[in-house]
Image (spheres, helix red, strand yellow):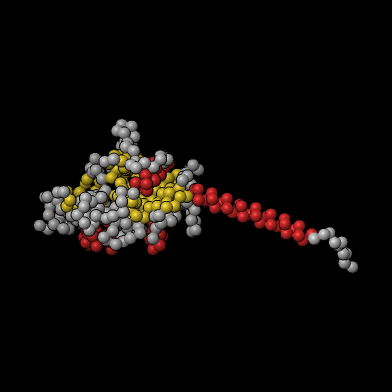
């Protein structure tokens, strides 16, 4: 026999109130999580950097997964980053000493139009407070190609840095601090218009004075006669704010954004090792062939292997 329960004055109404309170609490918790996520990662245009050195969360999981690589290049980009980071962690050369690994991956940027210089993805990796390697900065509007790679500007033929790994040092350029590739003539470059060697096949030699800096405005000088942004230097992003974010994350500092990144003082913080650059153009073969031709492209990707002297 079923036992009946006396009427207690709308108990379902009280339950409804309790459930409404629980749902409201859940909504507040979800909102808090969303706000926390927005505070951890600042995303503007085509540049991403973490306000704290924490892992950038992604849909496909893992702190070493690029968010800005072109879809068709993502697998290669992520594998390159993973293998280089693992190798460095085993050697204990850069990351474990508070330095950065800076990847410049041509062919993973937003545009492979040969008239543009927006075909490279720049990724910076550092260790977080827990000692884990994480991506702290990305930009897919970068380039490792000079404005006029096979031409001469103001009597100087433009150099293209060969694929490979290079130490990075703090340096100065005009009105701001930048990063310089290895000093003292240790940079392998491809040139085309030497005063002593004529022709258009290109030749490889050692150089110095090549830096990583920025375009201050969104324009290319590829198709005009204005002063080029690059005669051989690598460029990260567009505009000083983005470049300052790159510098902050690469150096592991949090300086306020200035109109120009502050100078590095000689003997104090200039010429200090900042990390290693990994320059890889394996994804950009068609782009390179449009700019350098087949032989020039082979030399760029193979450190000048089977180099031929240009014909007179």
- Left or right: where 110 falls relative to 184: right
Q: Furthest-top residue in view?
A: 267
**Residue at x 44% of width, y 52% of height:** 43
Q: Is residue 280 visible?
A: no
- Where residue 228 sits in the image (x, y, percent)? 23, 51
**Residue at x 37% of width, y 48% of height:** 242
Q: On the rendered image, what quadrant is the C terminus found in?
A: bottom left
Q: Furthest-bottom residue in view?
A: 1
Total number of numbered discs in the rendering: 0
206 and 209: which is toward the camera? 209
67 and 12: which is toward the camera? 12
- Left or right: where 182 falls relative to 51: left
- Where residue 176 sits in the image (x, y, percent)? 31, 41
- The image quadrant of residue 290 is bottom left
- Where residue 309 sits in the image (x, y, percent)? 15, 55
**Residue at x 42% of width, y 55% of height:** 66
**Residue at x 50% of width, y 48% of height:** 39
Q: Furthest-right residue in view?
A: 1
- Where residue 231 sits in the image (x, y, percent)? 23, 50
Q: On the rendered image, what quadrant is the N terminus found in?
A: bottom right
- Left or right: where 1 falls relative to 96: right
Q: Is residue 284 visible?
A: yes
């Amino acid at each position: 026999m079923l036992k009946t329960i006396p009427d207690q004055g709308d108990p379902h109404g009280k339950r409804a109130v309790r459930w409404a309170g629980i749902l409201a609490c859940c909504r507040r918790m979800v909102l808090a999580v969303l706000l926390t996520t927005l505070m951890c990662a600042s995303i503007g245009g085509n540049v991403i950097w973490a306000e704290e050195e924490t892992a950038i969360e992604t849909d496909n999981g893992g702190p070493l997964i690029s968010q800005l690589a072109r879809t068709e290049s993502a697998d290669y980009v992520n594998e390159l980053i993973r293998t280089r980071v693992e190798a460095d962690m085993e050697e204990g050369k850069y990351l474990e000493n508070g330095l950065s690994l800076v990847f410049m991956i041509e062919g993973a940027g937003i545009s492979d139009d040969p008239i543009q210089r927006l075909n490279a993805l720049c990724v910076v990796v550092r260790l977080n407070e827990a000692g884990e390697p994480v991506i702290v900065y990305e930009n897919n509007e970068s380039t490792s190609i000079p404005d006029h790679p096979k031409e001469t500007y103001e009597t100087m033929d433009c150099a293209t840095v060969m694929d490979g790994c290079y130490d990075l040092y703090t340096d100065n350029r005009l009105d701001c601090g930048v990063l310089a590739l290895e000093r003292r003539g240790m940079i392998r470059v491809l040139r085309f218009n030497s005063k002593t060697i004529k022709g258009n096949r290109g030749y490889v030699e050692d150089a110095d004075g090549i830096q990583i800096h920025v375009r201050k405005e969104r324009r290319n000088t590829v198709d005009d006669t204005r002063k080029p942004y690059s005669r051989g230097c690598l460029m990260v992003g567009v505009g000083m704010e983005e470049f300052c974010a790159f510098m902050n994350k690469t150096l592991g500092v949090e300086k306020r954004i200035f109109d120009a990144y502050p100078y590095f003082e000689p003997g104090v913080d200039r010429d200090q090792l900042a990390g290693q650059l990994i320059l890889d153009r394996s994804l950009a073969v068609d782009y390179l062939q449009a700019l350098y031709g087949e032989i020039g492209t082979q030399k760029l990707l193979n450190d000048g292997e089977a180099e031929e002297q240009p014909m007179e």
